[in-house]
Image (cartoon, grey):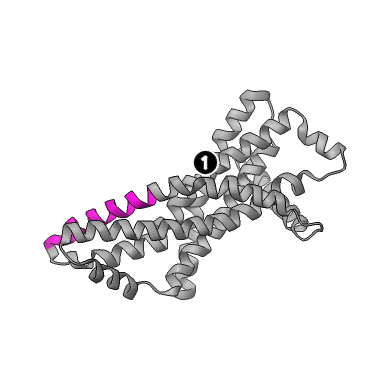
Amino acid sequence: MSAGIIQFLTAIGEVVFLTKASIRELFRRPFEWRLIITQLELGGIDSWSITVLAAGFTGMVLSLQFAIGLEPFGASMYTGKLVSLGIVRELGPVLTALLVGGRVGAGYTAEIGSMNVTEQVDAIKALGADPVRKLVMPRVVAMVIALPLLTMLADLVGCFGGIIITVLEVGVTIRFVFEQMVETLWIVDLLHGLSKSVFFGYLIAIIGCWNGLRTYGGTEGVGIATTRTVVFISVAILVSDFALTRLFLAIYG
């Protein structure tokens, strides 16, 4: 077995054990409300602006491409249906996860990694506290809550941007496009996207914290770990998106 495969399996095992420890700390009292609320603000509320900007222009570009591409077939009027389905099922959760993952996941690694190389994590242990309880669990819980909310915001803004461009390019009314979107989307479609975002939120937090806790080598090591986190999170989101899509299609059709 090659060294790369061994390292990969070791990393998976470490993430699994860190997840198990986080779940255990979640049910221990007293509950860390303040830490979770702080992480919700830092990871969720502070990310709404970039989410709105990216989702709005993505919906507009997607609508423009569909309107032009469907025009030779006389099907431009169905642009709203395709845009809403594409955003709610795929682009909304995936794009939001990639943006938030790059911003928040890297921040988690940089913060915890800096604490690790300056021996602050060891100090927490010396005081009798659990670093998983203080550093990892609040971030995982906050991200699992925040990312679905950001995804819903991205869905709304993306669909709104799609409506604007569809009205301008195709020449239909806002009411017509809105009714098309409502007729196309079902509760299952929303569940597809939101279920993915819950899992993506977990991946962002657990990978960011895991890389932070295993950071070494001073400030240079923190930079390397931060870059590694962005890559790991992006790959994990894209791979799991395919797996979850196949799973949901098999379950819901």
Residue 202, visible in the rendered structure: no
Residue 161: which quarter of the image? bottom left
Q: Is residue 69 magenta?
A: yes
Q: Which region shows up in magenta?
A: 54-72
Q: Is residue 186 above or below residue 141?
A: below
Residue name at image x 68 percent, y 37 percent: 112
For the point 62% across and 24% down, which residue is it?
Answer: 220
102 vs 155, nearest the viewer: 155
Is residue 241 found left or right of 225 in the rendered image? Answer: left
The image shows residue 125 at horizontal and vertical percentages of 83, 39
Could you tell me if residue 199 is visible in this image? Answer: yes
Tell me what residue is drawn at x 38 percent, y 57 percent.
157
Residue picked out by circle 1: 103
Residue 28 sits in which quadrant? bottom right
Give the quadrant of residue 104.
Answer: top right
- The location of residue 140, given as percent across then percent down, is 65, 52
What's under tag 1, amino acid-wise? Arg
Report the front residue among 14 and 119: 119
Residue 170 on image: x %, y %: 16, 61
Percent across and percent down for residue 174 are: 24, 66
* 42 in magenta: no
For the residue pair 221 and 147, the one nearer the viewer reads as: 147
Most frequent secondary structure within the magenta stretch: helix
Compared with 219, 121 (above or below) is below
Q: Which image quarter holds the N terminus?
A: top right
